[in-house]
Image (cartoon, rainbow, N blue to C red):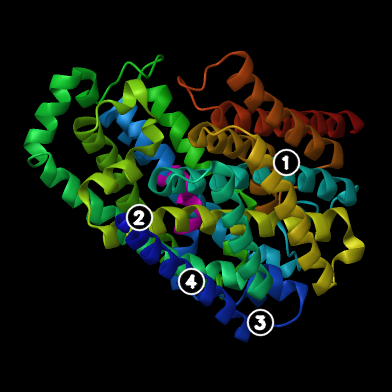
Amino acid sequence: MTKQIGIAATFIIFLLLFTGVGIYSATRKQSTTTDYLLASRNVNPWLTALSAMATGQSGLLFIGQVGFAYKIGISSLWLTIGWVIGDYLAWYFVFKRLRQMSEETASDTVSSFLSQNVKGSRAIAIISAFITIAFLGSYAAAQLVAGSKALNVVFGWNYHLGIILGAVIVVIYCFSGGIRASIWTDAVQAIIMVGSLLMLLVVAVASCGGTGQLWQSLATIDPALIDWNSSQQPWGFLPFFIGWIVAGFGVVGQPHIMVRAMAIDSAENINFARNLKTGLGLLNSISATGIGLTARVLMPNLMASGDPELALPYLSLELLPVVLVGLILAGLFSATISTADSQILSCSAALTQDIFPNAAKSYKLAKIGTLIVTSVILAIALTGSNNVFSLVTFSWSALASGLGPLLILRVWQRSVTFSTAIAMMGIGITTALIWNLKFNLSSAIYEVLPGMAAGLTVYGIALLFSNRSQLLRF
């Protein structure tokens, strides 16, 4: 009981820190929707990088990725490497131009940017907004579930209590300062994420007897755990790896991350933010993979009689003193909250700016939209699946497939007709869903690749027919 009180005290201190930063950000706010949604496009590149990292990695890192490494072994690192390559390419080719083009077109949301200068723009904005709310809402629900899983392990709380606590904290600092509060708290949370993961990794490896002994122990448990070309890649390594590169590139379809590019103070600072974000994100992912591998050695029973996604909180309880367990728990919980708040803001922006444009300039209605969206996401989290990895990867793929191809074309100022835009979104998402649910091929090639390829193929076919019809006129 004393141990739980000490952990709770440390955890609460960090929660108050996050909430305090969010509330303090309100001193810089302006009561406009552009400030609420984009922080007046004046965010420091350091904050942009830290926020993008914290938002992008989320509960998937602490819960999903650790659990994946626990089950699969060292080959799970290929997922990280592929993802980082794809993410870097997206920042390199898309983010800078999005910052420039979104300001030129005065677009405050991804959906409004997608619909600029297109006949039938209202329908495109509405459909893309519904896609955002449906899949980004599920994604946000997964973050609340991830945080509640950790609280359940440490304190024995019912899952529902942790989910509700996360939702309440998100609302408090979203209401205080909008996207600025989200970005500022993300930056603090990112630093805690990096520090807590590295600390636990060092302690866990030492407990295994060092890296050499860890490797030998994994080989004894199952030689596949140290096989870089795992049998978990049914079509072989190359299709699997390319699939995850495209998955990382699928960040172009994630409104909660793309909005950071739209909010940075200058397009010229994108390169610095990209490099800092990539370096810290890679460090975090390697740390999470290492923690999953050490947990497989130190806590082998989770595979048969537990939940591998809870390896990190179990390991921290086993190896760390009370204060540091509170730090780890705060790092995990902050990872989930830093993503959930961004996603909730993106969903509420889609609701109030794109679906109901009459509310677009109302600061008050923007806040009401945040409250409505949070209530819906809370309901999804309380009634949905507890598998964080599958929830996040599925939502990511749908958004990447539905919005990503169209955003790439719009960023590079390619003309897209109304019917082509609608077909691209619909066929992209449908392909990803069929690939995952009908054919069950995601373990061979992650469904972002066929989903985005299908969307771009629709555009290619439309372009071909358009050129042919123009030739026939002559």
Q: Are marks 2 and 1 in contact (CB under 8 Å)?
A: no
Of the image marks 2 and 4, the number of the one nearer the N terminus: 2
Q: Which residues are magenta?
A: 53-62
Residue displayed at 58% across by 77% down: 23
Residue that carries the numbered disc 1 in the rendered image: 134
Q: Are marks 2 and 4 in contact (CB under 8 Å)?
A: no
Quarter of the view holding residue 296: top left
Q: Report helix, strand or loop for mark 4.
A: helix
How far apart are the two marked residues, 1 and 4, measured between alpha carbons? Answer: 31 Å
Residue 154 against residue 16 in the figure, above or below: above
- Magenta region, main secondary structure: helix
Of the image marks 1 and 3, the number of the one nearer the N terminus: 3
- Inspect the image, locate mark 1, and give the three-letter code of the amino acid beneath it: Ala
Q: Which mark is residue 4?
A: 2
Discs 3/4, front: 4
Residue displayed at 17% across by 27% down: 218
Residue that carries the numbered disc 4 in the rendered image: 16
Residue that carries the numbered disc 3 in the rendered image: 29
Locate residue 217, reporting x and y percent.
12, 27
- Inspect the image, locate mark 4, and give the three-letter code of the amino acid beneath it: Leu
Q: Report helix, strand or loop for mark 3.
A: loop
- Inspect the image, locate mark 3, and give the three-letter code of the amino acid beneath it: Lys
Q: Residue furthest bottom?
A: 27
How far apart are the two marked residues, 2 and 1, measured between alpha carbons? Answer: 37 Å
Q: Is residue 82 left or right of residue 421?
A: left
